[in-house]
Amino acid sequence: MRVLPYGDAALLLEPEGEIAEVVALADACREAGLPGVLDVVPAARTVLLVARSGSDLGRLRAALDALEVRPAEAGAPAGTVEIPVVYDGPDLDDVARLTGLDRDGIVAAHTGTPWRVAFGGFAPGFAYLSGGDPRLQVSRREEARTRVPAGSVGLAGEFSGVYPRASPGGWQLIGRTEAQLWDLDRDPPALLQPGAEVRFVEVS
Amino acid sequence: MIEVLQVGPQALVQDLGRPGLAAIGVGRSGAADRAALRLGNRLVANDDEGAAGVEILLGGFTARARRDLLVALTGAPAPATVDGRPVGHHAVLRLRRGQELRLGPPSSGLRTYLCVRGGIAVPPVLGSRSTDVLSGIGPEPLEKGAELPVGPEPAAYPLIDVAPVAPPPEGLVTLRAVRGPRAEHAVDPDALATVRWVASGRTDRVGMRLEGGTLEVAEGAGSLPSEGLTRGAIQLPPGGEPVVFLADHPVTGGYPVIAVLRDADVDRAAQVRPGQPVRIRL
């Protein structure tokens, strides 16, 4: 693992490996209760540790040396969420062209393998889902849409995700769901919690 | 209770934000100038330095006390009056029931903080009363007619009447920074310290864009997989004009962070006006 400088109140961790190793490292950082750390921010290849103003980053680095990270495959998911999807997205044809799968093949691939909440960002309640069928890896759309409806289910790179609310976006849209990804009146407000397993289910 | 009679360009309730929720896509938010909010709360002897106050952008704000209150103004020195009588900044002010506090446009800086003994007691959202303008989480931006409840009086009493604090500067602002995790994504990261930058008009609580030059992005290094951002991170988008992230920054971003402001200097960055010259010292 590389530890990269990030000012006087944060450190950026770059584990060997890919998203599975990032998820495992973020889990370990949360569980360890690292000194002075206010937030653990996993992303695609890195984990950012945001520390309290004025905290001792030397002490934090020392605590990281002692950190035990379980192998990526070992961690059990923090619950499973099923998301019902109508697969009629406007980018199905493009995804078919990019992947060589037909519509049914895309649906089978998207529903056939469980996904895992890797990290958040972009908007409250948005989760980058990783670990799905590798045949579904597609680039973003060349031009982002100015408005993607809430509940749109998309693909980008190695990730799948569901838009919690209407927003601009560049992901390839393959379907839509009625599931409420974000609801401030619910506890917790985010449907998809860090580490959870997600299964997409086709509905008509 | 405080009744808002007039709002200028923006007035928001802010405390020190909601840390720890990045994994569900929620940023910390909080007062753009944390030091000013803390100072105001200390002046009125609130137990919590992070009690919620009102963050007022460029003055134009009038409010009426609906009961006797102790308040303090910190941050940008907006000329202030109570029922027409000038009052000072960084000082403990008594507002009698029915009196009106009025703020004009500040001579320097952007954001003035109105801190109240007892704190602004609107209902918290996810543990904080801060309005995050990027995600839309938190109380609605204040409008004319808003009524702000005030929390219970703390036990302690103010110890000082006035805090000697320099106002935000009118001219050149120097901000200290260190190299960031992706400094090598700029051909010459040290050029960040040599260009005489100017704060762009595209500056808000999310971030401040710097103009007046460009940094060359190293070949093939324009974007990278999303990674976490902090307040004070200086990102280099493909156009080469750096962006300094402020209180309501996105949780993650896909352009390289080439430098990071010292934590203590981020508050001063949040007071830099569009058009003001900025120097970054690495």
Image: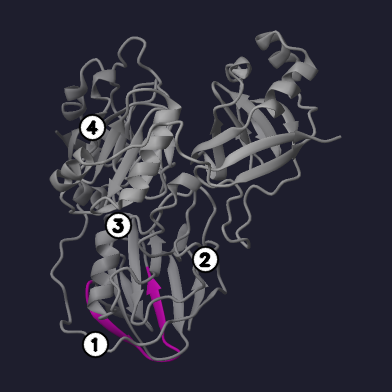
Q: Which residue is mark 4?
A: A3
Q: Which residue is mark 2?
A: B142
Residue under the image location 52 percent in, 49 percent down: B135
Q: Secondary structure at mark 1?
A: loop
Q: Which residue is mark 3?
A: B33
Of all chains, the one bearing label 2 is B
Q: Amino acid at mark 3?
A: Asp
Residue under the image location 29 percent in, 42 percent down: B232
Q: Secondary structure at mark 4?
A: strand
- Callouts 1 and 4 on one subunit: no
Please give the range of residues in magenta: B90-103
For the N terminus of chain A, the image quarter is: top left
Of all chains, the one bearing label 1 is B
Foreground tag (1 vs 3): 1
Q: Which residue is mark 1?
A: B156
Badge 3 or badge 2: first in the primary sequence: 3
Classify residue A152 as left or right of residue A160.
Answer: right
Foreground tag (1 vs 4): 4
In this view, A134 is above or below B87: above
